[in-house]
Image (cartoon, rainbow, N blue to C red):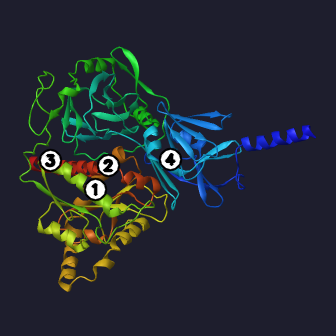
Amino acid sequence: MKKIISLFLIFIAALCAAPVFAADDKAPAVKDVNLILDGENFPGVSLYVMSGKTVFFSLRELSEVYNATLEWKPVSSTVMMRMNNKKVELKANSDLVIFGKEEKKMSLPTRLIKGELYISPEILTSPEFSDIAEMDTSWNPKTSVLTVTHRSNIAAIRYFTAPDNTQVIIETEEPLPYEVFKSSGAIVLHVHKGKVQRDFAYPNNGAVRDITYETEGKYATVKINLEQKPKLVKVMALKNPYRIAVDIEHSKEVDIATLSEVTIPEMETSTAPAVAEVSGTYRTVAAVPLGVSQITEMIAPMESDQDNKDLEKVPVAKFDEKNIIDDSYAIIDDTSTIPEMIPRKVAKSKTFVRKKIIVIDAGHGGEDPGAVGPNGTKEKDVNIAIAYALKKILDDDDNYEVVMTRKDDTFIPLVERTNIANEYNADLFVSIHCNANFDRAATGFEIYFLSEKATDSEAAATARLENSVLELEGKPSKKRALLQDMLWSMMLNEYINDSSELCSFIAAETPGRLKIPNKGVKQASLYVLRGAKMPAVLAESAYLSNYAEEAKLNTKKFQTAVADSIYEGINKYYARKEKLEKNSSKK
């Protein structure tokens, strides 16, 4: 009898020591989750529903998202999640989580089911987890969207092309020390303490082929792969805002007046790092995306060893943190490799008689939010952010003067927008929007000019969406309606070719910067363009209805890239007109 009682007590003790499972601890229901990692769809993560409503994520699946290693300790039923030399300790069926050395109680316990640990979104979105992962996470239960973004202190890497030089601008959130190296057919920068999302840009402008960048340990590597041997390379640290400017003087002039469209293959990431020779030794400088590798195989690189030897003779500046220059006034460091300061503003062309007036129209506003993304992003907010990014870069170019149709969250009737442009005798009218579609898979950049008929059914649907704001405006006066009809006819006859050409130049700039499908130039009866007495275009930056593109549209990096594409398109459009005028004057 005592033996039986002892066995019974041992059995009870074993039950108490074992993990406590709820009644529903069976295989959970599995649902799709839209996981967006750094603006891209990330497959392989599902949503697990317990008790018909409570949602959890598999820690094993999440480990790939956060680049974490997992260590299971069976005796204590604990999982150690290690990231960035830090750890998160999670105990099975417990609501306590240890972030580093800090213990915090969650509202829901973890769940151990069939040997797999499941955790609630609350853990991922906590500030403690974000600090350890160095990634910010948001969860929208209504749309099942999990958005994860690497933290970065390098806001954007931009490029601008002129006939005699290419400027690469590395915008940083703070002053960062850096080093510059000459590699084989490339210029390499190590930005110390720099953090940047792994990505690339693809100028392919005849001087710079592509720019790859990623974080490597304690610095960010930016590699500028060249298509021609530069005449001179000048590098300078600037502020207001903080940035590192790389000015590459071309040995052969680049023709920016000829339209050349860049097609980017669909991106895949490669785990194989690219290796560059620096100071006689090999070191990893960038993990080149597979798409870039495919492109560079199709384009002739710097052909000979002699070209590479010549590059070694190119003077390149090397700076420390103390050499940061405030470009609000000129203080030049005593360095023979930089004979003059890189200008903050673009010099005014001698051929321009006056500044070109560019009217920037941020679509929607006020009681008209425009399209609304699945995560609640309002189109009007994205539009004005892009509009201000475009205004800033045009303001820094002495060739242009900017007028905004709206400067804040104000409702402006469509007819008044082009009327503003007409009153200022503007040279160009650029309306900025985001696209939307019932099909959440729809994606890409497209740009429109005015036409009586739409290019296709999708263009017609876009026109209906953009024109739907007319319901808020009421009927225009007879005088206004008559004026609109008259100006509509003028626009079709006089400015349609220029509008089409401007669209083409802007569209050609987007693939290398945005890395989303370029759906090209389209025509539609867009009311906001009617009546403009100048070339007028409407840019649909990306699809706000698409989960991944909504995430992109919310980033300064993408907003800046859209603005840069429009700016460069405008520059090349005017370079084309200038070239045609010169050719006609010679005849």
Q: Do labels 1 and 2 touch, CB within 8 Å?
A: yes
The CA distance from mark 1 to mark 2 is 8 Å
Q: Give the camera-side residue of 107 and 316.
A: 107
The CA distance from mark 4 to mark 1 is 29 Å
Q: Where does the image place residue 540, in percent across and percent down from the top left?
A: 34, 59
Q: Which mark is residue 72?
A: none
Q: At label 1, which amino acid type do we have?
A: Ala
Q: Is residue 198 left or right of residue 170?
A: right
Q: At label 4, which amino acid type do we have?
A: Leu
- Viewer-nearest of labels 3 and 2? 2
N-terminal label among 3 and 1 = 1
Query: From where the camera sits, is residue 224 visible?
Result: yes
Disc 4 designates what residue? 124
Considering the numbered disc 1 on the image, is that residue within a helix, a strand or a loop? helix
Q: Image point 56% across, 44% down: which residue?
A: 96
Disc 2 designates what residue? 556
Q: At label 3, which amino acid type do we have?
A: Asp
Q: Which mark is residue 397?
A: 3
